[in-house]
Image (cartoon, rainbow, N blue to C red):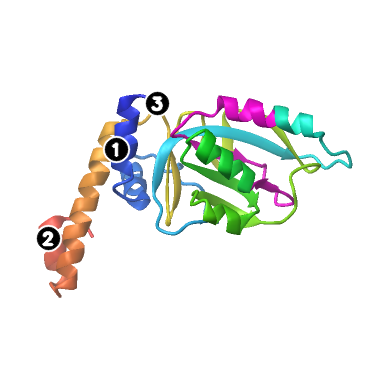
Amino acid sequence: MTEQIMEWCSRLEKIFVPAVADVLDVMGIRDQCLRAGFWPLLPDVTVAAPAFTVREVYAPTKEFRSEEEKLRIFAEFFDALQEDMIVVVDTGGCFEAAAWGELMSTITKYTCSSKAAIVDGAIRDVTRTKELDFPVWYVNRTPADSDGRLQLLDFNKPIRCGGVLIRPGDLIFADDDGILSIPMDGSVDIEALISQAEEFVDLENKTRAELREGIPIIDVFNKYGRL
């Protein structure tokens, strides 16, 4: 990750997702918020980082993978995963099996030093993953294992997660309000986006403080031009 991207992520983590969503709206970019239905496993967590994309598909079989085969898949996956990234998983809408659990969280956090996971599907091992203090956003839960049910198709390729096209390296920004993806293909002026979002947050903080003092909303709006 470049120093510039690290700086952008650090600044994003000091604000909140709705502010950036509002600026994207102003910029005319209205399709970057992942659809409603994702839940944060941990409360009060804000993360921003480049996406490491994963695509899985529901492919039920009565044959289970050998331990050697599972080890090979894990090794390929985690060898490609870099530190300070967010794993983004597209399951094609599968809730029949867990696409993420304690083992994935443990390796992602402690071996790869990555920040979080976004799973457009189901997870399991919820209590133990919470104990790891590893942030995961997910859509559903199930105790069913992925072995014999989900097949890893590829990673570090474009995917759709929450209805949004996400390319490897796009900036993922998530908090309690939800998740959005910021394209890194040159279609968005990232510096302008973050700077304007920071200004929005500053104005909202001032607006909120004066409204709590009982100042009429019209006076507050005329002063700051934002509610």
Q: Secondary structure at mark 1?
A: helix
- Are the residues at dot 3 and dot 2 in contact (C-beta closer than 8 Å)? no
**Disc number lying in front (2 or 1):** 1
The stretch drawn in magenta includes residue 86: yes
Q: Amino acid at mark 3?
A: Met
**Outermost residue toward the right in this view:** 62
Number of the front mark, 3 or 2: 3
Crowd rating for badge 3 (residues with CA inside 10 Å; few <14, some 14–19, many 20+): few
Q: Label 2 amino acid? A: Asn
Q: Which residue lies under the disc numbered 3? A: 1
**Span of residues in magenta:** 73-101
Q: CA distance from mark 3 to mark 2?
A: 42 Å
Q: Residues within 10 Å of mark 1 (few under 14, many from 20)?
A: some
Q: Residue at x 28, y 39 (%)?
A: 194
Residue 1 in the image: x percent, y percent? 39, 26
Residue visible at 57% across and 44% down? Answer: 105
**Which mark identifies residue 193?**
1
Q: CA distance from mark 2 to mark 1?
A: 24 Å
Mark with earlier residue (1, 3): 3
**Mark before the other along the chain sequence, 2 or 1:** 1
Q: Which is more toward the observer, 127 or 56?
A: 127
Do tag 2 and tag 1 residues touch (Cβ < 8 Å)? no
For disc 2, the marked residue is 222
- The kind of secondary structure element at disc 2 is helix
Please tell me whether residue 13 is drawn above or below residue 42 in the rendered image: above
